[in-house]
Amino acid sequence: MKYKNPLHAIGRTAALVIAVVLGSPNLAVQADRPPNFVLIMADDLGFSDLGCYGGEIATPNLDRLAQNGLRFAQFYNTGRCWPTRGALLTGYYAQAIRRDQVPGIRSGGRGKRPDWAPLLPRWLRPAGYRCYHSGKWHIDGMPCAEGFDRSYYLRDQHRFFSPRVHSLDDRKLPPVAPDSGFYATTAIADRA
């Protein structure tokens, strides 16, 4: 956008800087350490299922995180989990990164993401963040190879009690025997 008077651009930039500085009273303390953040994506979770959004189910730990932090008030997902996960981890629409079904193009859950769409850890790790993944994947590549420090990846997500395909830090784990007491939700939470 062009300005007829360059002072307008300078004034707007100065106003933005002043707003950021005044809105961050502990800026000097925070400058040496980036803020922590947690992204949680849960399948079949409605917008008002958590207590912090008015839900009936008791979610005290998540509510405490929400009370002391920033939470999404508006995010659009797709009808399936894997395009939403791709969009969340890249910042691009699912269709732009080949994470939604496109006739005639290898896409969807088996397509290759464009090289210009790295996952969030590729940006966060150079900034000093440690990045962890626990749960389903459905994105091309493997979690640690794509920038995560550690990962528990449940590829066999339809087998809640005896998965045959799951990995720890991009290395395959042995299949879980039936009646072993394994439960996918617990395993994912324990490794989160």
Image (cartoon, rainbow, N blue to C red):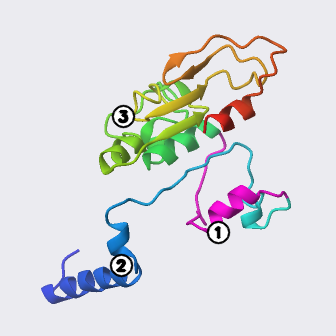
Going from N to C along the chain, the mark reached first, 2 or 3, is 2
In this view, 35 is above or below 160: below
Going from N to C along the chain, the mark reached first, 1 or 3, is 1
Q: Residue at x 15, y 89 (%)?
A: 7
Residue span colored magenta: 57-80
Residue 115 included in the magenta stretch of the image: no
Going from N to C along the chain, the mark reached first, 2 or 1, is 2
Q: What is the count of numbered marks?
A: 3
Query: Split into 4 quadrants, where in the image is the N terminus?
Result: bottom left
Kind of residue at badge 3: Pro
Label at residue 20: 2
Q: Residues within 10 Å of mark 1 (few under 14, many from 20)?
A: few
Element at label 3: loop
Residue 79 included in the magenta stretch of the image: yes
Quarter holding residue 31: bottom left
Q: Residues within 10 Å of mark 3 (few under 14, many from 20)?
A: few
**Quick check: marks 2 and 1 in contact, CB under 8 Å?**
no
In this view, 85 is above or below 51: above
Percent x, y of residue 184: 73, 28
Label at residue 114: 3
* 125 vs 44, nearest the viewer: 125
Give the label, 2 or 1, closer to the camera: 1
Query: Split into 4 quadrants, where in the image is the C terminus?
Result: top right
Viewed as shown, does residue 38 lie left or right of 177? left
Element at label 2: helix
Q: Residue at x 40, y 27 (%)?
A: 145
**Quick check: marks 2 and 3 in contact, CB under 8 Å?**
no
Kind of residue at badge 2: Val
* 110 vs 178, nearest the viewer: 178
